[in-house]
Amino acid sequence: MLKPQFSNETLLSNFASADQALLIQALSLLPPDDLDYHRPTGKQVASILLEFHLDLATILAALLSDPRLDGQLSEKRITEQFGSEVATLVKDVNWLNNLNVYQVEITHEPQQSEILRRMLLSMTHDARAVLIKLAYRIQRLHDLPKESYEMRHFIAHETLDIYSPIANRLGVSQLKWELEDLAFRYLKPQTYRAIARSLATNRKQRLLCIDNFIELLKSKLDQDNISVKIYGRPKHIYSIWKKMHRKQLNIDELYDLLAVRVIVEKLSNCYEVLGIVHSQWQYIPKEFDDYIANPKENGYQSLHTVILDPEGNRIEVQIRTQEMDEFAELGIAAHWRYKEGGDHNATTEKSIATLRQLLAKKESDEMLLEGFKTSLFYDRVYVLTPRGKLIDLVKGSTPLDFAYAIHTDVGHSCRGAKVNGRIVPLTYTLQSGEQVEILTTKHGAPNRNWIDLNLGYLKSPHSISKVKNWFRQQEIEHNVALGKNILEKEIHRLGLIGLPLKELCQAFNEPDSQRLLANIGRGDITSRQLAGKLSIPELKIQPIKTEHKGDASTKAHVLVDGIANVLTSLAHCCNPVPGDSICGFISHHKGITVHRTDCINLVQHSEQHQTQIIAVEWSDHSSKHLVPIIIQASNCHDLLNNVTRVLSHAKVPIQDAHLKTKDDSSCVLNLNVQIKNVRQLSQVLALCNELPNVFDVKRKT
């Protein structure tokens, strides 16, 4: 396509007199043409679009989206003067023109390019806005010689990665070829010129060769009364280079530089024409493809063959019915998967056919246009990471869905999110084009509320399954730990020693020890059943040799006014240990009760009881004292085992333990441990605080 020359008269002549008033009104709003302005203008873009016989609203939107009007025309004003349809188109085109997401590195990431194309298509309310944007890009490419080398390469790369595939996807082949050829000219100027010179040198010869072939074939088919339409098929520089590069061939070795298409009336005619072609000219067997008997995955049907004319020229011949030709041009966009690759659904393909029909009409078809508006990629949302990577999500996705799309561990540890730098709830519905940052915690875990669909934390089935799998695994691990604890207690109760997992697996016909312990923890295997199996002599479990030891002293070794052997007891409300600052409270029935000086019960005593508080001090720090501590963790995985191991290593006995699991899978472990003094207690608290998943450890008060 040659660079169009714009004139108001040419523009107005394409529309009825009733529409010309609106065009004149739009033209009057444009600034005067400036030779020093190096960016596309609304007039230039409108001139390109006139070639496609588009409707009045499209041409008005092309004029009014002129970058020089940016910020001068409000959406309200455009709506009042030209209607809401034009205002929406202008808004979409301005958004597309101002979008700055593409990075040259995307060239090496086909998936990112595909997501960006879908994002552009999904965020426009009207298909015609994309066409206007493509026309803007054509004009920008025409103006590139005025730009810097770096900008020329950037625009050319972006065109080949994003805009020419969109043009191909939308079936606008005329724009597609020009976008590709213009971009290629800036990226590989020497190669472009070499191919162009070769085509120009041989152009007359190629045309003569094609004309001779068409004339001869037409006469042969007329003799057999076969009605056909035959025409030459043009080739373009970028597609020629791609084929040369892909097949590692010189330009004169390409088969389809000379190509014709034969359109027949019915299926049987296809094979009749093929027989005549093969009988009249020598053909190359390895280049014959029957896409009628074996259609391509996208449904494309045609016969392809390559023949040699008397001068040795290779000519590609495509033979198909009118219906097949219409399907190839208007149906599922046959060249889409073949040229671009990637996965595309039936909704998208139907939308492409719709747009192609729309472009073929002189005037806008509102039903076709509405079908395109509502079906193309509207079930997806496209958002960016802080580094600019595009993520493709289902429509309605939340920041949590985004986190799980990045990585499962990011989702599990997600505790908050920012969208465009602003903190949002995890239930926030993401919109295309937004930038999302996930805030995580080091030892985070999912919350059961996340899989409650009524609460709206997650939309994607993929994300929901990740959370469910996590809880399923936690339940298994919890049951295994619980089962091991039950088994050890049962072995201890029976006075046995050892942990015969292998033998028990065989006895209960379980495949492995994890399944065995999980079934014990779940209650599927009862203590009674365990006792029965543990009594089997074949298990060879030996009785435990026990030694009876006295209980650790819990007596308070305290001096009252320097006197020992006074009846004292330690208060259960604050559980003082040697090293704590203490005082005594004279009780009428229990002697003197020893409290920590910061004990809340002691502080709250009324003034009339203050006379009952006396000074006391520790007399012997070698005895052990029972102290309750509370450990809170984000999950129960190996918590009890880890605590037991740490305290055993520190030689701190555990008197008893109680583990309670909450609905969100977090848990609380209450322990009573035997402590010598405050220093040892401080060490115990510090050791427990360092364990995995533990977020709080404190002495119970």
Image (spheres, rainbow, N blue to C red):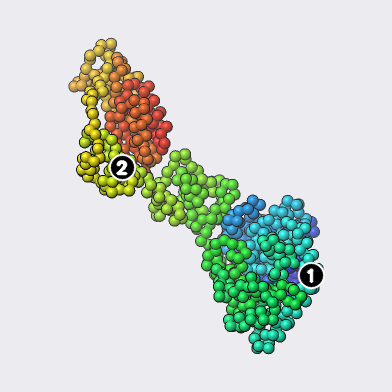
Point out the residue furthest to the top here.
Answer: 562
Task: Tell me the number on the disc at residue 502.
Answer: 2
Which quadrant would the N terminus be assigned to in this image? Answer: bottom right
Asked whether, in this view, residue 214 is left or right of residue 352, the answer is right
Q: Is residue 549 visible?
A: yes
Question: Which residue is at a point 51% across and 53% down the rendered structure image?
Answer: 430
Query: In the rendered view, would you say 112 is above or below 6?
Result: above
Snapshot quadrant of residue 481: top left
Q: Residue at x 80, y 73 (%)?
A: 204
The C terminus: image quadrant: top left
Residue for point 59% across, 49% down = 388
Q: Residue 619 location, x and y as percent?
A: 29, 14
Which amino acid lies under the numbered mark 2 shown in the image of this protein? Lys
Residue positioned 34% across, 24% down in the render: 598
Image mark for residue 607: none
Q: Residues within 10 Å of mark 2 (few under 14, many from 20)?
A: some
> Which picture quadrant has residue 517?
top left
Task: Look at the numbered disc 1 and give the secondary structure of its residue.
Answer: helix
Query: In this rendering, does residue 26 appear at all?
Result: no
1 or 2: tag closer to the N-terminus: 1
Can you give x and y, in whole percent of width and height, for residue 76 in the image? 61, 61
Q: Quadrant of residue 358?
A: bottom right
Vertical placement of residue 144 versus 60, above or below: above
Report the amino acid beneath label 1: Asn
Residue 510 located left or right of residue 169? left
Residue denoted by label 1: 202
Q: Position of residue 556 (x, y in %)?
A: 26, 19
Q: Nearer the viewer, mark 1 or mark 2?
A: 2
